[in-house]
Image (spheres, rainbow, N blue to C red):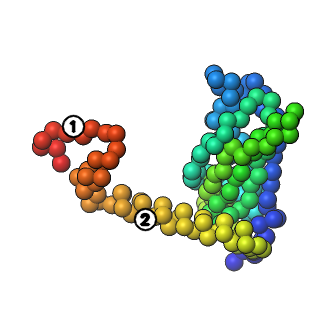
Amino acid sequence: MKPFKKVDSSRISISELMLPSHSNFSGKIHGGYILNLMDQIAFACASKHSKTYCVTASVNTVDFLEPVEVGELVTMKASINYVGRSSMVIGIRVEAENIQTGNVKHCNSSYFTMIAKNDKEESIEVPGLILNDKTEVKRFLKAVKRIEMKKARVAEFDHANFSHMDYLKELKNYRVKIDLPENYN
């Protein structure tokens, strides 16, 4: 069994000045560029914890809360929130600072699930996690709940007996018109 490591031992942050070349047609920093940076910091954090190569397995909830402007200094902070056998959930916080005013805004928080791999690209065991404070415990528990909710969602919608007909009545409160042929099942 691998040893246990403190969350602080793999915590990482990066900062980058946002340039016009990173912007979209509306003059804001392109969301895809921010996602690319988030993937890089998730990789760095997971690799630092596991001491091995890691790959992105999934991204949970990417909500762009505030736009990032050209000329702002973006800082991303990442930490291990959860570990499984070979998986790690990396929590990432994205902030943008107006370097002229010093105003800092929270632009995004997200969770990347990373998997540790060996040279043969097989999943390998990662160190366990030592939780040192209440925030770290809360983050771990929230990650467990997100994993449980995902498993329940997959079980509900991916099973062989799933029928959209069981859910049509739930669509009446949405802006959708169902126009299926009469013999459609």
Which residue is painted at 61% across and 70% down in the image?
141
Q: Which numbered disc covers residue 63? A: none
Residue 16 shows in the view: no
In the image, residue 57 above or below residue 133: above
On the rendered structure, is 32 left or right of 79?
A: left
Q: Quadrant of residue 89?
A: bottom right
Mark number displayed over residue 152? 2
Outermost residue on the bottom side: it is 1
Camera-side residue: 158 or 109? Answer: 109
Q: Residue at x 36, y 57 (%)?
A: 158
Q: Which residue is tagged 1? A: 179
Q: Amino acid at mark 1?
A: Asp
Quadrant of the image occupied by residue 91:
bottom right
Residue 160 image point, x, y percent: 29, 59
Identify which residue, 27 or 84, lies in the foreground.
27
Q: Secondary structure at mark 2?
A: helix
Residue 5 is situated, as x and y percent measured from the top left of the image, at 78, 71
The image quarter containing residue 88 is bottom right
Q: Residues within 10 Å of mark 2 (few under 14, many from 20)?
A: few
C-alpha distance separating marks 2 and 1: 29 Å
Q: Looking at the picture, how far across and down is residue 46, in whole percent?
A: 72, 58
Residue at 62 percent of width and 42 percent of height: 64
Nearer the camera: disc 2 or disc 1: 1
In the image, what residue type sits under mark 2? Answer: Ala
